[in-house]
């Protein structure tokens, strides 16, 4: 039986009050159509670009030194980018939920409405950024440099010039191969590498944000992830984002994850502050989808990947990758 809320939504979508007496497949199709229309109407109400900044006074930050203002501006910018992505992704997620034929659950759908808590947080972040920027200007602070401050760079487990060497094996068998990521620069919110895939291969730029998400996911034949990780991961945090297969750029896996462990980890003769994340999701395949799940371990300070294991019926999303050594600069 349809609930009272579903009946009302069906009526507003143009169906008769006898819709609940249709055969179950017909009822499900009608309900899905009604939810689809509702998702579209809700999704059009707010985009991240339309969220107005909340009122925050620059006076709140006038006593801050320039270095502290710069660090907070960087933090707010990064968090605002993550929240803006979540706001803009909601409409697309609603459509995907309905199109792949999964069970529609109204509370979960309504929880994703873009005029909800994410939009409210984005308004606060935008207001805070404007106030910080105004305070920095009034104090005569120099323009924000993209170079990571020396003290913060020294606290990271990797340094410019060092080469991170990974072993990757396809989960379906076959020999493993190694590739390297040579760290070129540490910037505010970004680490710049050169991807070295082996003899005869042309080195390619590889950029990731400070949380560990790839910024050039579509330019390399290497599995990567976007908008999945965030800074300051804590035990129990729930994440969502995308995996981009090396040969399936048109079949992006949408995944969710949860941090199931945090703590120190010694690997490749380096000490890392590791977060272990359990992953699960699906790779679209026409009207169907292929399951993908696994585990990822990253360094919370730098976003550097320490280990990745994925299982899937899609071979592009079935692999094992692990950091095996760190080669010093020079």
Image (tube, rainbow, N blue to C red):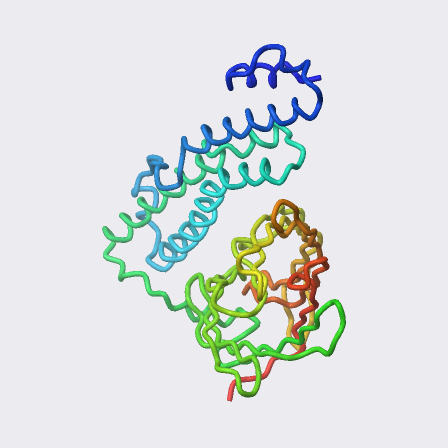
Picture quadrant of residue 18: top right
- Extreme top residue here? 17
Residue 258: percent from the left, percent from the top?
A: 66, 49
- Compared across the picture, whether 278 is left or right of 90 comes to right
- Extreme right residue here? 173
Establish if 38 lies above or below 76.
above
Residue 73: percent from the left, percent from the top?
A: 38, 53
Residue 267: percent from the left, percent from the top?
A: 68, 73
Residue at the location (70% across, 68% down)? 320
Quadrant position of the N terminus in the picture: top right
Establish if 195 lies above or below 286.
below
Residue at the location (70% across, 54% down)? 293
Residues 280 and 239: in front is 280
Establish if 68 lies above or below 205.
above
Establish if 169 lies above or below 261.
below
Residue at the location (33% across, 48% down)? 132
Residue 257: percent from the left, percent from the top?
A: 65, 50
Residues 101 and 81: in front is 101
- Compared across the picture, whether 266 is left or right of 160 comes to right
Residues 317 and 155: in front is 317
For the image, the number of numbered tags is 0
């Amino acid at each position: 039986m349809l609930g009272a809320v579903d009946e009302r939504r069906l009526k507003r979508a143009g169906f008769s009050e006898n819709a609940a007496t249709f055969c179950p497949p017909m009822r499900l199709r009608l309900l899905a159509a009604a939810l689809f229309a509702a998702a579209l109407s809700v999704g059009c109400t707010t985009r991240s670009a339309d969220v107005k900044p909340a009122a925050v006074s620059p006076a709140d930050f006038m006593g801050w030194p320039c270095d502290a203002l710069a660090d907070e501006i960087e933090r707010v910018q990064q968090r605002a980018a993550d929240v803006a992505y979540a706001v803009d992704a909601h409409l697309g997620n609603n459509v995907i939920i309905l199109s792949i034929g999964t069970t529609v659950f109204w509370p979960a759908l309504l929880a994703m409405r873009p005029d909800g808590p994410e939009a409210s947080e984005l308004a606060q972040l935008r207001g805070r950024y404007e106030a910080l920027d105004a305070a920095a200007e009034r104090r005569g602070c120099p323009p924000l440099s993209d170079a990571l401050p020396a003290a913060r760079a020294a606290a990271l487990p990797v340094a410019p010039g060092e080469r991170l060497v990974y072993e990757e094996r396809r989960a379906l068998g076959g020999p493993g191969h190694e590739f390297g990521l040579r760290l070129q620069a540490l910037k505010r919110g970004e680490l710049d590498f050169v991807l070295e895939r082996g003899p005869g291969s042309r080195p390619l730029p590889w950029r990731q944000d400070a949380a560990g998400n790839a910024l050039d996911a579509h330019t390399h034949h290497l599995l990567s992830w976007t908008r999945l990780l965030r800074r300051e991961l804590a035990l129990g945090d729930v994440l969502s984002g995308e995996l981009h297969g090396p040969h399936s750029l048109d079949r992006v896996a949408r995944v969710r994850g949860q941090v199931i462990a945090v703590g120190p980890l010694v690997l490749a003769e380096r000490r890392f502050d590791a977060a272990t994340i359990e992953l699960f999701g699906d790779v679209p395949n026409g009207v169907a989808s292929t399951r993908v799940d696994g585990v990822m371990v990253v360094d919370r300070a730098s976003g550097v990947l320490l280990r990745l294991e994925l299982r899937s019926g899609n071979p592009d999303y079935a692999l094992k990758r692990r950091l095996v050594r760190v080669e010093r600069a020079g």
